[in-house]
Amino acid sequence: MSAHESIEHAEHAEHASGINRKIALLIAVLALFLAISETLGKSAQTEAISKNVEASNLWAFFQAKSIRHTLVQTAADQAKLSLGSSDETSRVAVQKQIDSWEKTAARYRSDPETHEGTEQLAEKARHAEHERDLANARYHHFEMASAAFQIGIVLASATIITSMLSLAWVSGLLTLAGLGMTTLGLWWPHLLHLH
């Protein structure tokens, strides 16, 4: 090997080494973004599950209150039918019981003090469902971002082995796509419907 060939070989190896360092840096950045998107995805998934349980519990409580409301209102209505056939003392006692049942039925329907009337429970349950849907939308975006980062890591690794710089460019584009999906998941999760 001539001196000129040796110099060319050394320059080529130095150039390849510089490119490999840049690719290694790209892989490290992709791994960082992957870790962030995976963490955000797990957090969103946990929140979605939690809000789903909360909504289910609230709807179950709503159903129980609705049943109680119906039973108490039916008892009051049934007692009203017996008012005409009672003597005066019985009528006063029955009317007192009817008033108590109707007050209880009204409280089951709406209870602004405890916020546990069916109207308030339905509102809370719908809010929990909205929060669940938001967390699910975020989760899907973060999962797509994670996939883009993972594929980018594989392609960047393949660039080192094959010396095909086009793979590094595709990896860079996937990095941008992953960052875009992460951004959408954080701030505009309902912009794209992924589920």
Image (cartoon, helix red, strand yellow):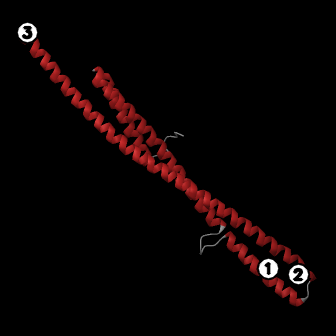
Could you say whether the residue bearing mark 1 is in a helix, strand or loop? helix
Packing grade of label 1 (10 A; few <14, some 14-19, many >=20) is many
Separation (CA) of disc 2 from disc 3 = 119 Å
Of labels 2 and 3, earlier in sequence is 3
Residue 89, compared with residue 118, is above or below; it is below
Residue 168, compared with residue 33, is above or below; it is above
Residue 173 shows in this picture: no
**Left or right: 30, with 89 as reference point:** left
Q: Residue at x 19, y 26 (%)?
A: 17
Separation (CA) of disc 1 from disc 2 = 10 Å
Residue 114 position by quadrant: bottom right
Q: Residue at x 82, y 83 (%)?
A: 95
Packing grade of label 3 (10 A; few <14, some 14-19, many >=20) is few
Q: Which residue position is annotated with label 1?
A: 98
Q: Nearer the viewer, residue 60 or 82?
A: 60
Packing grade of label 2 (10 A; few <14, some 14-19, many >=20) is some
- Camera-near label (3 vs 1) is 3
Residue 150 shows in this picture: yes
- Camera-near label (2 vs 3) is 3
Kindly give the residue lying farthest to the bottom in the view shown: 89
Of labels 1 and 2, earlier in sequence is 2
| Quadrant of the rendering where the C terminus is positioned | top right
